[in-house]
Image: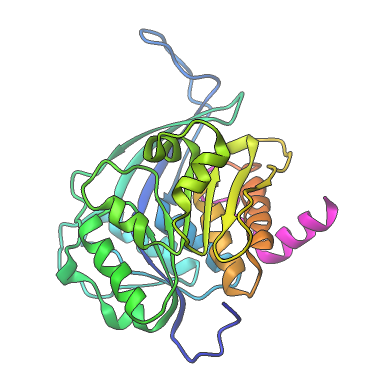
Amino acid sequence: MTPNVSGKAYDLFGFGIAAVDDLIEVPRFPHAGTKVEILGRRRQGGGLCATALVAAARLGVKCMYGGFLGCNELSDFTRTVLRNEGIDFLEEVPYPDAEPFHSVILVDHATGERTILYSREKVVAPWARDIRADLIKNSRALFVDHFAPDGTVQACKIARRFGIPVVADIENANEAGVREVIALADHLIVPIRLAIELTGANDIESVVFALSQQRACTAVTDGARGCWYIEGGKDVRVKHQPAFTVEVVDTTGCGDVFHGAYAAALLSGSAIPAAIRFAGAAAAIKATQPGGQQGIPDRATVEMFLRDQ
């Protein structure tokens, strides 16, 4: 993937989860039956797909969000977040009651770790018939997560039909159809917990090999331990990208930022090892700031960070 000289409207079309996150910072995680003072609260945009698109947009990628939003406060907040980042979204409202996911995130001030409580009560899961083939065809890459697998599989098949690479951020495979999304992904990045669940393998190299399936890239992330990955069509070695050492404030959204930065690096023409390193740097920088999207860096910040390593 090289800089956009194709004449296509978008570099990256995203189909998946958008969320509104209410972050509650506490001095420590509360135990049952106790009281804990709230140190701070704020509302931000979140969600796997939406946060990845925000990361890609700040890194210079022209993005489009293809999920459904309705006529309500949470949807309007999400539109404002996307608009402020220069990300396009569907103007039509076929499902007026649709809402993004709504999360309350407890952030441990001492460690930066978080616990997410979320609701999907009014989230509309698009069906295959809802997928806009014209928008996917007019994009250079497709980004998906594990939400709405019926629609996501259709989106991936459309992308495959037009030779458009699929980058997938999968955090769980509980719903029927998610494993088909995994099989259709050209660039698959999953957390180690899910990778072990999917493969049954014990050591990290076996896990990555078992997931590789000759795709362009398979990567398994493990937080502070870094990322292991293998390139399809190259050698058969599993490579390791160590995590960068930073002072962690909040890990909310770090995985999503990794995915968005990886897609942005590929779209700028980076080779896969450089894209993985670039993504790791972007995620590390984000971890130094609170919230899932507030601390997402721009390209100059990531490049300066990497020069200093």
**Where residue 304 appears, x then y in whole percent?**
79, 59
**Where residue 15 appears, x then y in whole percent?**
34, 64
Q: In this view, does 118 lie to the left or right of 163?
A: left
Name the residue rendered at 61%, 67% in the picture: 265
Which quarter of the rendered picture does the N terminus lie within? Answer: bottom right
**Where residue 75 appears, x then y in whole percent?**
29, 58
Q: Which of 18 and 240 is in front in this view?
A: 240
Range shown magenta? 291-309
Q: In this view, does 222 lie to the left or right of 101?
A: right
Q: In this view, does 75 lie to the left or right of 290?
A: left
Say if 140 sits above or below 125 in the image.
below
Residue 250 seen from this side = no
**Where residue 124 appears, x then y in whole percent?**
19, 56
| Residue 305 falls inside the magenta stretch | yes
Q: Which of 204 and 190 is in front in this view?
A: 204
Q: Which of 224 and 118 is in front in this view?
A: 224
Say if 111 sits above or below 87 in the image.
above
